[in-house]
Structures are given as structure tokens and as C-alpha cells.
């Protein structure tokens, strides 16, 4: 009997399974599932976030003209043109009074005390005031130099003093204070130191002040410490 021996190469070939053997087979991999709806949602979220950021940046750059108060205006006082200034502010959605309405603002009164730097809103103004009501009256004065302070300002509180002219009899030559708290409603100073002044006083004393003012016997004393 002939016994044939396998060569070393044949032994290695027998030990190594062929390509068609069981060990060469791989487990099937399921195809990756695609979700187009989720992908579309992600794209929309990205675009939405970018759009929102762009809008915020653009909105922060929006500027509007508003009315700013430059001097203190007491509650009940008329808001003068000199107390208004135009400022550019960011459009934050707060209903500030637009600068284009400044002509209407000067026809109103301060509902509360307005401090310098205040951005005006409509609730801060009023169309009428208790200071110019049924118990108050406006009196116009034409004063000469020496009858009023040279630095008299609008909205100041003044004393109205009766100063008789020379030639009156002794019974009427005594000076007297007609009112201790009259408010300057308007003032137009002249070059000579006098000017036209409108004051707000009680109706009970208004006729007397008007009478003395017509003969040039009225003087105003400023009270800077009184608001």
C-alpha cells in the first residue's frame, strides 16, 4: 500500500478555510434608516434661529426720536419749549412721546414732577391742572427794571409786593405783600431789565394785583428755595 504524504503547503491550505467557507461569511447589516422629516425640522430650526438673531440685531439698531426733559418741571406746571430736547433712542417698544408731537406737549401740564433727563411719556402730561382752575387766575404784568429780578425764570415762585409810588397819602404809602406764592407762568424779559410777566394767583387777589399793576406799583420778589 502506498501512503502519500501531504506537503507542508497542502497542510496549510487545508487548515485555512477557503473564501466560500463559513468563517468568511459576514452578518448582514441592515440599511441605515433615513428620516427626512427630522432632517427638515433641523434645517428649519437652524434657519429660524438665524432669522431671529438677524431680526434682533436689526431691531437693536432701530432709532426713534423722542422728547427728553432738560429742566425740572413741577407737577401742575405748563411744560415750556425750553424744557424739551430731541434725543435718539433705541426702539424698545415703550410708548415714549415722539419728537414730532412737541408742539402739542407745550400745551400740556406736568402730571408729575419731571426731572432733567426724563424721557417723556403721555401719562406724564395732563391737558389741565388744578393750579389754573376755578380758584386761580392769570395776571399779566408789565414791569420795569428794578421791579423784578434780572434772572427771573419761568415756573419760579415769587412774592407779589405792592410798592406805592410817591405822592400817595400816608394811608396808602405802606408797602405790603399781596400774595406770598405766585407762580410765573411766562416771562419775556426786555433789554432794559424789565419785561412782560404772567403770574398765576388766587382769584381773590387777582383784581387787586391787576389794579396796582396798571399804575406800575407792583414788584416781584423771587423765592428760589420754594418749588
Image (tube, rainbow, N blue to C red):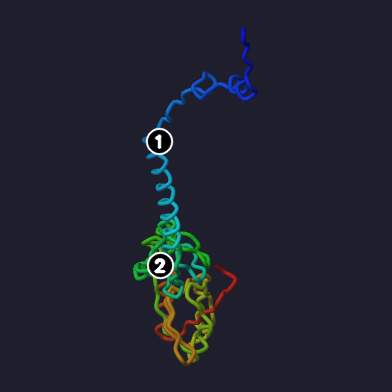
Observer-nearest of 227 and 44: 44
Report x, y in % for residue 33: 41, 30
- Total marks placed: 2
* Mark sitting earlier along the chain (1/2): 1
Q: Quadrant of the N terminus?
A: top right
Observer-nearest of 172 and 79: 79
Q: Which mark is residue 38?
A: 1
**Quadrant hosting residue 81:** bottom left
**Quadrant hosting residue 32:** top left
Circle 2 is placed at which residue position?
A: 65
Question: Where 101 sits versus 15, above or below?
Answer: below
* SS state under label 2: strand
Report x, y in % for residue 214: 39, 84
149 vs 2, left or right, is left
Observer-nearest of 45 and 155: 45
Report x, y in % for residue 200: 43, 71
Whole-number angstrom distance, CA of label 1 to CA of label 2: 46 Å
* SS state under label 1: helix
How packed is label 2: few (under 14 Cα within 10 Å), some, or many (20 or more)?
A: some
How packed is label 1: few (under 14 Cα within 10 Å), some, or many (20 or more)?
A: few
Q: Residue at x 51, y 20 (%)?
A: 21
Amino acid at each position: 500500500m502506498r501512503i502519500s504524504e501531504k506537503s507542508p503547503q497542502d497542510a496549510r491550505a487545508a487548515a485555512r478555510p477557503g473564501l466560500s467557507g463559513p468563517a468568511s461569511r459576514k452578518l448582514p447589516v441592515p440599511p441605515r434608516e433615513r428620516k427626512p422629516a427630522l432632517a427638515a425640522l433641523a434645517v428649519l430650526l437652524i434657519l429660524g434661529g438665524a432669522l431671529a438673531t438677524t431680526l434682533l440685531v436689526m431691531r437693536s439698531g432701530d432709532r426713534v426720536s423722542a422728547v427728553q426733559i432738560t429742566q425740572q418741571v413741577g407737577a401742575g406746571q405748563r411744560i415750556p419749549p425750553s424744557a424739551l430736547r430731541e434725543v435718539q433712542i433705541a426702539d424698545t417698544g415703550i410708548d415714549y412721546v415722539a419728537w414730532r408731537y412737541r408742539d402739542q406737549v407745550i400745551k400740556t401740564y406736568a402730571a408729575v414732577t419731571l426731572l432733567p433727563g426724563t424721557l417723556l411719556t403721555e401719562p406724564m402730561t395732563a391737558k389741565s391742572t388744578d393750579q389754573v382752575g376755578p380758584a386761580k387766575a392769570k395776571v399779566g404784568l408789565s414791569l420795569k427794571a428794578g421791579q423784578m429780578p434780572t434772572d427771573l425764570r419761568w415756573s419760579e415762585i415769587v412774592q407779589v409786593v405792592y410798592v406805592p409810588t410817591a405822592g400817595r397819602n400816608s394811608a396808602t404809602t405802606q408797602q405790603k405783600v399781596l400774595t406770598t406764592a405766585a407762580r410765573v407762568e411766562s416771562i419775556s424779559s426786555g433789554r432794559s431789565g424789565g419785561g412782560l410777566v404772567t403770574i398765576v394767583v388766587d382769584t381773590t387777589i387777582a383784581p387787586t394785583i391787576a389794579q396796582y399793576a396798571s399804575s406800575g406799583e407792583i414788584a416781584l420778589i423771587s423765592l428760589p428755595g420754594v418749588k
